[in-house]
Image (cartoon, rainbow, N blue to C red):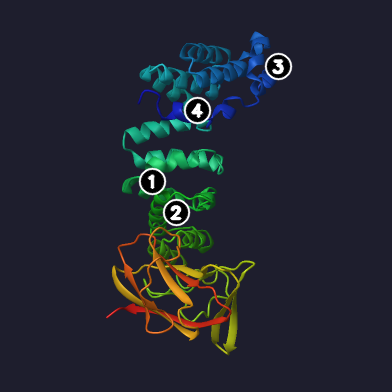
């Protein structure tokens, strides 16, 4: 094991301190779990929990000697308690007594797999042995016990980092465990690498006799789209949801005539996002049965984003055209590669006339943006197309 070991690192980061202070025993013993400094007042017959609390504090302070002493005392006071042998094991790990650490955690495992530190230790051991399936089994056990486990992302990150680890995780997730919904939730500030890896895990889970429902994987596909990951989102949606929702021709614009803009993202995830504010109105209107358009009006003094969508366009020159009641040079188009639409600084052509030419590079997270320049006239956009520029 590395000098401080995975289990020790997780403990010191707060992953298991609260667990070691679980409320067992009675009287002052329970109180010491919440206020470890009171452990000195605990009578000897009730020392097990106090030793766990004091040992946790010693570990947090990097006090190896006292952590080991409290671990040994906890085992003496309650030799059948898995948490006591787990504390002793982690203390030995801190002291770099790896054989003693392994012996302690073997005893703890024999007394039941419900102890968190024991699961963490054997997860780390499996990872060091490149046994991805066993590591995924231990991670699954930890997350089944607590689907909202703090530090879960760090726990599974080593598995997500390799194809073998992703497949092992997919085997567990294919059973739709209670933690799957949280696993496929990107959060407010998602890590792009993590999203990419989890998209691969999701695809592998679909191929394992997957029990996950479209609601879970389809929701994750929508989150991929919001982060500009069109190709991954399409692949996952087609594999997991089948005909449950419309998916566009690969790579090209979705919903070029705005028919789906009124539907929810659950019904039609591939398509436009619209943007409006106090000085910008963006609405969908019905011109005739089965004929829709986007109507935009701006009182802003600057160019504003009105529409965007994630795209997967091959490198090359592309021409974007806008049809409708669009005054000359009112619309400009942007193409960016980091999942965020930015106002273009250089514009080649007019989208409302012969078309605006865009130069596409190899993009992982391409976003097409439609921008409205300042002006009094209302703009009605009936159709948008993209085609190779000749």
The mark nearer the N terminus, 3 or 4, is 4
Picture quadrant where residue 154 is located: top left
Would you say 46 lies left or right of 205 here? Answer: right
Q: Position of residue 256 (x, y in %)?
A: 46, 79
Residue 65: give its label.
Answer: none
The residue lying furthest to the right in this view is 27
The mark nearer the N terminus, 1 or 3, is 3
Q: Position of residue 10 (x, y in %)?
A: 47, 31
Instruction: Rate crowding at label 3 as few (under 14), some (14 to 19) or many (20 or more) other CA atoms within 10 Å.
Output: many
Disc 3 to disc 2: CB gap under 8 Å: no
Q: Position of residue 93 (x, y in %)?
A: 41, 21
Residue 174: give its label.
Answer: 2
Q: Residue at x 54, y 30 (%)?
A: 14
**Mark 4 falls on what kind of element?**
helix
Give the label, 2 or 4, closer to the camera: 4
Residue 28: give its label.
Answer: 3
The mark nearer the N terminus, 3 or 2, is 3
Residue 11: give its label.
Answer: 4
Picture quadrant where residue 234 is located: bottom left
Whether 14 is drawn above or below 291: the answer is: above
Pick the quarter of the image with the N terminus.
top left
Give the label, 2 or 1, closer to the camera: 1
Q: Residue at x 47, y 42 (%)?
A: 153
Residue where numbered disc 1 is placed: 160
Disc 2 to disc 4: CB gap under 8 Å: no
* Mark 1 vs mark 3, CA separation in Å: 43 Å
* Mark 3 vs mark 2, CA separation in Å: 45 Å
* Mark 2 vs mark 1, CA separation in Å: 15 Å
The residue closer to the viewer here, 109 or 376, is 376
**Mark 2 falls on what kind of element?**
loop
């Amino acid at each position: 094991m590395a000098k401080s070991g995975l289990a020790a690192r997780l403990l010191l980061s707060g992953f298991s301190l609260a667990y070691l202070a679980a409320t067992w025993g009675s009287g002052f013993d329970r109180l010491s779990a919440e206020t470890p400094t009171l452990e000195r007042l605990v009578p000897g017959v009730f020392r097990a929990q106090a030793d766990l609390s004091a040992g946790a504090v010693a570990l947090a302070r990097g006090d190896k000697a006292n952590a080991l002493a409290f671990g040994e005392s906890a085992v003496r006071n309650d030799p059948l308690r898995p948490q006591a042998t787990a504390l002793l094991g982690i203390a030995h790990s801190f002291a770099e007594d790896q054989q003693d650490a392994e012996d302690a955690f073997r005893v703890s495992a024999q007394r039941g797999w419900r102890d968190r530190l024991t699961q963490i230790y054997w997860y780390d051991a499996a990872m060091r042995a490149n046994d991805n399936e066993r590591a995924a089994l231990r991670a699954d056990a930890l997350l089944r016990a607590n689907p909202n486990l703090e530090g879960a992302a760090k726990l599974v990150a080593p598995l997500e980092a390799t194809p073998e680890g992703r497949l092992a995780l997919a085997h567990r997730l294919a059973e739709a465990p209670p933690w799957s919904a949280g696993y496929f939730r990107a959060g407010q500030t998602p890590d792009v690498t993590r999203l990419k890896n989890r998209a691969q895990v999701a695809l592998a889970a679909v191929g394992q006799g997957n029990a996950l429902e479209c609601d879970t994987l389809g929701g994750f596909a929508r989150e991929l789209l919001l982060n500009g990951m069109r190709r991954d989102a399409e692949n996952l949606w087609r594999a997991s949801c089948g005909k449950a929702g419309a998916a566009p021709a690969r790579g090209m614009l979705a919903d070029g005539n705005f028919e789906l803009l009124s539907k929810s993202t659950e019904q039609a995830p591939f398509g436009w996002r619209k943007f409006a504010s106090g000085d910008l109105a963006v609405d969908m209107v019905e011109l005739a049965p089965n004929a829709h358009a986007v109507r935009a009006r701006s009182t802003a003094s600057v160019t504003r984003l009105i529409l965007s969508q994630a795209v997967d366009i091959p490198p090359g020159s592309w021409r974007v055209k806008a049809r409708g009641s669009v005054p000359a040079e009112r619309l400009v188009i942007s193409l960016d590669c980091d999942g965020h639409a930015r106002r273009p600084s250089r514009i080649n052509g007019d989208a409302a006339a012969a078309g605006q030419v865009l130069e596409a590079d190899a993009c992982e997270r391409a976003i097409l943006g439609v921008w409205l320049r300042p002006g009094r006239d209302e703009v009605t956009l009936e159709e948008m197309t993209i085609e190779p520029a000749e």
